[in-house]
Image (cartoon, rainbow, N blue to C red):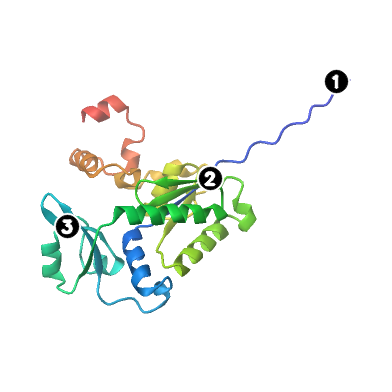
Amino acid sequence: MAAAHSLSPSPPARRYLFLALPYLATDRIRRRTLGRSWRSATPPETPLAVVAKVKNALRLATIDERGERLGLSIGQTLADARAMIPSLETVAEDNAADRALLEGLADWAERYTPLVALASDNGLFLDITGAAHLLGGEEALLADLGKRLAIQGFSALTAIADTPGAAAAAARFGPASVVPIGESSKMLTPLPLAALRLDRKTIAAMDRVGLKRIGQIADLPRAPLAAR
C-alpha cells in the first residue's frame, strides 16, 4: 500500500497596504504649532501652503485641504496665490523634516507588520500578508490605522490590494479601500493614468493621443505604445 503523503498548505495570497499622506508637510507644521490633536479641534480659517523656489520664482509645493477647497494648486506661483487669498499662511519647504517624519511613521507602522517600506511620494508600503487577521481582518486593520493617524494629527489615504502598485492606485483613485483578492486588474482598468504614478510629462503625452485610462494601455504592445 502506497504511503500517504500530506499536502503542504498553500501560502497565503500576497496582500499589500499603501498609506498615502497627501498633507504630510502641512500636517507636520500644524502639529508643531497647534499640537498633535489639532484635527479634533476647529480647523484653522487661514489656509496653509509650503513654498519652494523653482526657477527664480516662489511656488506652492504643498497646500492643505482648505487651500485646495479655495482653488489653490501645487505649482502655482506664490504671487498668484496671494492675489487669490491675501491671508494665505506660508512656510518654507523642509524636505529633511518631512523625510524624518515619514521615517518615524514607518517605524510606528511596524505595529502592523515588520515589512514596511518608504514610497517616493510621501507614502508607505506595508506587506500585511497573513497579518490582517490579528486585527479582525483587512477592513478592521484599515480602520484602526486611520483612527490612530487621525488622533496624531494626520490625514491619510489607505488601501489594500494584491500588489504594491494596485494598493497605491486604489488608495488615491480607487472606489474601494479593500480590493478583493484577484481583482486588482479589474479595479485598475477604469482609473486615470495618473494612478500609475507616471510623471506629468508622460501623462500629458498620452493624453494628446487619446490615452486617458489604464484600461486603454493595459494590453497594448510596448513598442507601438512608445511610438505613439
Q: Is mark 2 on a helix, strand or loop?
A: loop
Instruction: Please state the horizontal and vertical placement of residue 99, each as a whole percent of the image.
Output: 36, 52
Quadrant for the N terminus in the image:
top right
- Residue depicted at x 19% and y 39%: 205
Nearest the viewer among 163 and 37 is: 37
For label 2, the residue is 115
Amino acid under label 2? Answer: Leu
Instruction: Please state the horizontal and vertical placement of residue 73, each as a whole percent of the image.
Output: 21, 60
Nearest the viewer among 31 and 18 is: 31
Q: Earlier in the sequence, mark 1 or mark 2?
A: 1
For label 3, the residue is 59
- Residue depicted at x 61% and y 58%: 135
As drawn, is 126 to the left or to the right of 132?
Answer: left
As drawn, is 72 to the left or to the right of 20?
Answer: left
The numbered mark at residue 2 is 1
- Residue depicted at x 10% and y 69%: 83
Marks 2 & 3, CB-CB < 8 Å contact: no
**Farthest residue in the right direction?**
1
Question: In front: mark 1 or mark 2?
Answer: 2
Q: How far apart are marks 1 and 2 (CA)?
A: 43 Å
Q: Earlier in the sequence, mark 2 or mark 3?
A: 3
Instruction: Please state the horizontal and vertical placement of residue 52, each as a whole percent of the image.
Output: 20, 56
